[in-house]
Amino acid sequence: MEIRTLPELVQTIMKEKGWTQADLGKTWGRTQAWVSLVLSGKQDVRFNQLSDMLRRVGYELVIRRRLDEAAVKRREFIASAATVTLVPGANGNPYRDPDYVSMLSDKIENGSLRSGVASAAHAAAHLRRVEHALMGGKDARLRRAASSLARNVAIAQYNTHELPQAHKAGRFAFALAQSVGDHEGQAASLNELSMFSAFEGDGLHAMQYARQALTVPDISLEIEASAHMRLGRALGLLSESRAASTHLDKAQEIGSGLPELRRADMLGGVGVALSEQGKWEASHGTLAEVVRLIAPMSPFLGVNYLACQARTALRGSQPTLAAELVDTLSRVAPLVNSERLNKLYAKILSLTNPWANAPEVKTMRDQLRTLLL
């Protein structure tokens, strides 16, 4: 059996399993309305998301060469172009091609997850070219792809500690998603803007963005769980501990069925929020589990949460535990790099001051200084 379109695929799965739109939506962590949009051809799904969704229902994606030579050459061009910084030529502008822009977005996202070193400068250059290509145009597919690109550019800038630029790209991503009625893109952008604000200690704006994300209809369970986690963290920064706990618990409840990487990353946010609220033991346990789950899938996130765990240990007056964690960190941290991680290492170093004369802490401080070189 060969299936050529996404609506045809969805219809085939529903017929084979005897499912309604609501049944399929529940399996995929989506709403019935979202499945309906897919069936009508009004909702695109990114390649990596589709691959994971199909795995859950017993299908897999297979890519093979077509006999149509022109189509083959075009695909090969797009695949190779995505590995370099492409300057549009006189014969056309690839930044007007939604497929090309989506591929750029995936490339930047994958680079951030693996190593944290997706070039923010190159990513921003791509985004500027897309902005120019969007002028005067109303192509909904291109706007959706551009919104995804802008979100991933914002994350790359966040990782390099370019917070004003990250906020700007995040707001642009939200505006693009809003212009085409992309609910998932709107809520995802708001979640990321909340994350940027929380990182800066701005609980008020972090709370406002997360609350707004939760008002967006027809969003996936992943985005909903993330919004509750972001809101819980923001409320903790505002010293509203009881409300914060309610939303952090809700995030874990909703996110329990997510794919492992996404669930672990969401739990990492919960662990960080618990640390900010002074719940050291709960934070340590959560972050330890997150590091175990996430490190094999994303070295950058694994290092990030291991560093957060070390910071939590020092905040909880456990320098020996922190020294053990930093010893592990010093072995794996050279594999990844970002200015955001450097800021975290510097913070951990400053937290060691009360125990500076302890032998294990002296070693830890030397290791941290090495990481900061």
Image: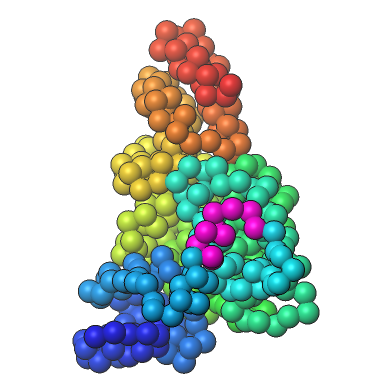
Q: Outermost residue toward the right?
A: 136
Coloring scheme of the render?
A: rainbow
Nearest the eye: 139 or 93: 93
Exactly how many numbered labels are in the figure? Answer: 0
Nearest the eye: 370 or 108: 108
User: Which residue is rendered at x = 66% and y = 68% of the image?
Assistant: 95
Instruction: In the rendered view, tell whether residue 9 sits above or below residue 216.
Output: below
User: Which residue is rendered at x = 39% and y = 57% of the image?
Assistant: 262
From the viewer's perspective, tell me whether residue 93 is left or right of residue 250.
Answer: right
Across and down, in percent, residue 147 comes to: 62, 68
User: Which residue is rendered at x = 70% and y = 64% of the image?
Assistant: 88
From the viewer's perspective, tell me whether residue 168 is left or right of residue 25.
Answer: right
Nearest the eye: 72 or 234: 72
Across and down, in percent, residue 129 comes to: 72, 63
Instruction: In the rendered view, tell whether residue 22 sits above or below residue 186.
Output: below
Instruction: In the rendered view, tell whether residue 115 sits above or below residue 254.
Output: above
Nearest the eye: 124 or 62: 62
Across and down, in percent, residue 265 comes to: 42, 52
Q: Which residues are magenta?
A: 77-86
Q: Quadrant of the N terminus?
A: bottom left
Q: Is 257 one of the magenta-colored residues?
A: no
Across and down, in percent, residue 219 comes to: 48, 75
Q: Is 85 one of the magenta-colored residues?
A: yes
Residue 168 image-quadrant placement: bottom right
Let me know if residue 53 appears in the view.
no
From the viewer's perspective, tell me whether residue 26 is left or right of residue 134.
Answer: left
User: Which residue is rendered at x = 69% and y = 59% of the image?
Assistant: 87
Q: Quadrant of the C terminus?
A: top right
Instruction: In the rendered view, tell whether residue 357 sits above or below residue 273.
Output: above
Let me know if residue 135 appears in the view.
yes
